[in-house]
Image (cartoon, grey):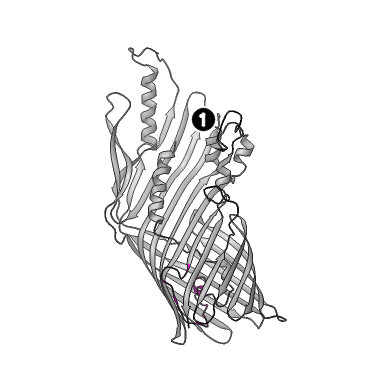
Amino acid sequence: MTSLKIKNMLAMAMLAAGSSAMAQNLNSAYFTDQFASRNTMNPAFGNDQNFVSIPGLGNVNISLQGNFGYEDVVMKNPRFGIDSNKKMTTFMNPYISDAKALDGFSTGNNRVVGDVSVALLAAGFKAFGGYNTVELNSKSSLGMVLPYELFEFARNTGNNNYNIGDISAHAQSYVELAFGHSCNIDEKLRVGAKFKLLFGVARADFKFKDVKADLSAPEKWTISGDAQADVSMKGFQYKMKEKEYETAGAGTYEKIDDIDVDGAGLGGFGMALDLGAVYKINEDWTVSASVLDLGFMSWSNDMQATNKNKSFEFSGFHDTSVNSDRPGTIDDQTDKYSDQITDFINLQDKGDKGSRTTGLGATLNVGCEYQLPAYRKISFGLLSTTRIKGEYSWTEGRLSANWKPLKWLDGGISFAASSFATSMGYVVNIHPKGYNFFIGMDHILGKTSKECIPLSSNASISMGMSVTW
């Protein structure tokens, strides 16, 4: 029922996300003192060294998180070697039991979110009574929310009433110019702030709202839902195609067949603010907190598309004839239902609805670090991270052990539990005089498919290089 819309929206999402991604950072490095990009997680953090990042390689973060994944959709084929030569199949395979087919899906919302962030250029230096940063970053984010009832309905279209709910997809991409400053208020308290100018590339939102499938009544089946796509991007257009209805004499209709981008340019403009503080309770204990990406984006256009009819009703085939030369044949009624489905599932271009304003999705970090009195080179940290972004929100708690064996080497390992999964992470930070290199993961890559797709939808990689002095 939704394959065409999903195909079109994935194309829009990839278009909007194709230039890079949003506010994901390497949380495993939050308590790593000489991590050059530490200020991206809390603007109050300073650094002992000045630095200039290698263009495009100073701080690269790629992250994928979800509570369902490839292994829940693609499974081993129970008929392989019997009457099929395909090793893998989908959860829709009738030879897989309902319990096993639906076991991997959350009974609430099934979500996947992705972030990629690339520091095009960044610098940090001591001046003006504190530590200062200037950054030019490319950021994007994408997400998808699929209710459990959607998979249940797809798996078992029995005589039931399915209240599926909302199906959502989202993508956003922009470039950020940020100016940060942090300084000590006294011996215990340090504060920081970062002001950001945002230059929008694209944003795409799709929602199929209040989807219901009532198959319980014997006399008719009803499927309803309100589908709407909103895309904001300079030069974006839906490409329409005219087709004839199946019913003779019913005329023609237009459907979205593809998308087109005529030229490139600034699609939106916005501003954001990061705020942070670090308080040293004593020689052993330090607490910190920050809120990131408090801001908005104003987009210059909103190319909207909706489904023409909000419901489809099937009341069966009545008073039909199998003779093609008589009225009321099965073919005639099949054509009528086909046309109803067409108006229900096909998105139609509604034109430019004008400007719109959207939020970024704020991130809240709260941290606590304990340094071992007997061995100052080791500390333990607890970090709580919350992304506030509506149905794409998530929370993570991360416990880390941090080690500074040498002046030019530090890092640590961490364990996290989040809204999506549990995971292990690490960071290695090498910073001799004149150079800094780091690599780390918040979610160590587990098993993958032969196409290198993470089976659990949870994986990340972060790395960067800078010149220091």
In the displayed structure, would residue 1 be above or below residue 204? Answer: above
Is residue 127 covered in magenta?
no
Q: Is residue 301 left or right of residue 431?
A: left
- Quarter of the image holding residue 306? top left
Q: Position of residue 361 (x, y in %)?
A: 46, 61
Q: Position of residue 397 (x, y in %)?
A: 61, 63
In the displayed structure, would residue 379 be above or below residue 61? Answer: below
Q: Which residues are magenta?
A: 31-59
Split into 4 quadrants, where in the image is the N terminus? top left
Q: Residue at x 61, y 35 (%)?
A: 98
- Dominant secondary structure, magenta: loop
Name the kind of residue labelled 1 in the image.
Leu
Q: Nearer the viewer, residue 411 or 344?
A: 411
Q: Nearer the viewer, residue 157 or 464?
A: 464
The residue where tag 1 is placed is 215
- Quarter of the image holding residue 6? top left
